[in-house]
């Protein structure tokens, strides 16, 4: 029983760490890509942060390691629309 609790805690810690790193890396890469394409820093930051949050909510840790453009494009469009008002 104690081992199960410890494993669950380790798994949770590991996933939390992955999620923090994923969000930081995803946002950084996204902003860099967007600003390199001429998008303003402010718009890129808002859109990419929104997208990172939605990815965190919608995909498991394993799914995040294999995201496709087809999965990300609708999320990016949704975030752009919500930011544009």
Image (tube, helix red, strand yellow):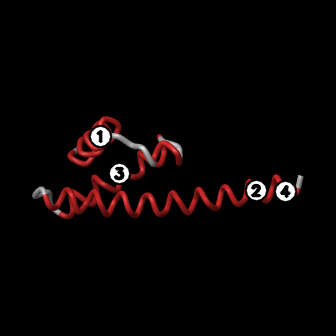
- Sequence order check, earlier mark of 1 and 4: 4
Q: Earlier in the sequence, mark 3 or mark 1?
A: 3
Q: CA distance from mark 1 to mark 4?
A: 40 Å
Q: Residue at x 29, y 60 (%)?
A: 29
- The residue labelled by disc 1 is 69
Report how far apart the C-alphas of labels 4 and 2 lie in the structure.
Answer: 6 Å
Q: CA distance from mark 4 to mark 3?
A: 37 Å
Query: The residue tagged with tag 1: helix, strand or loop?
Result: helix
Q: Find residue 3 and name its label.
A: 4
Label 3 secondary element: helix
Q: CA distance from mark 3 to mark 1?
A: 16 Å
Disc 2 to disc 3, C-alpha distance: 32 Å
Label 1 neighbourhood size at 10 Å, few (<14), some (14-19), many (20+)? few
Q: How far from the left and from the top, in percent, is residue 22?
A: 44, 58
User: Residue 83's x, y, as percent?
Assistant: 25, 48
- Circle 3 is placed at which residue position? 50
Residue marked by disc 2 = 7
On screen, residue 18 versus residue 39, left or right, reads: right
Q: Residue furthest right?
A: 1
Could you tell me which secondary element the residue under label 4 belongs to? helix
- Classify residue 45 by image quadrant: bottom left
**What is the spatial separation of the Cα atoms under label 2 and label 1, in whole angstroms?**
34 Å
Are dots 4 and 2 in contact, CB under 8 Å?
yes
36 displayed left or right of 2: left
Residue furthest toward the front?
A: 66
Residue 39 lies in quadrant: bottom left
Query: Callout 2 environment at 10 Å: few (<14), some (14 to 19), or many (20+)?
Result: few
Q: Nearer the viewer, residue 76 or 42?
A: 76
């Amino acid at each position: 029983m104690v081992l199960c609790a410890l494993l669950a805690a380790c798994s949770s810690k590991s996933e939390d760490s992955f999620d923090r790193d994923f969000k930081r890396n995803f946002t950084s890469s996204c902003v860099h890509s967007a600003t390199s394409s001429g998008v303003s820093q402010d718009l890129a930051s808002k859109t990419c942060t929104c997208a990172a949050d939605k990815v965190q909510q919608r995909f498991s840790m394993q799914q995040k390691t294999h995201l496709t453009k087809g999965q990300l494009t609708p999320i990016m469009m949704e975030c752009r629309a919500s930011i544009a008002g």
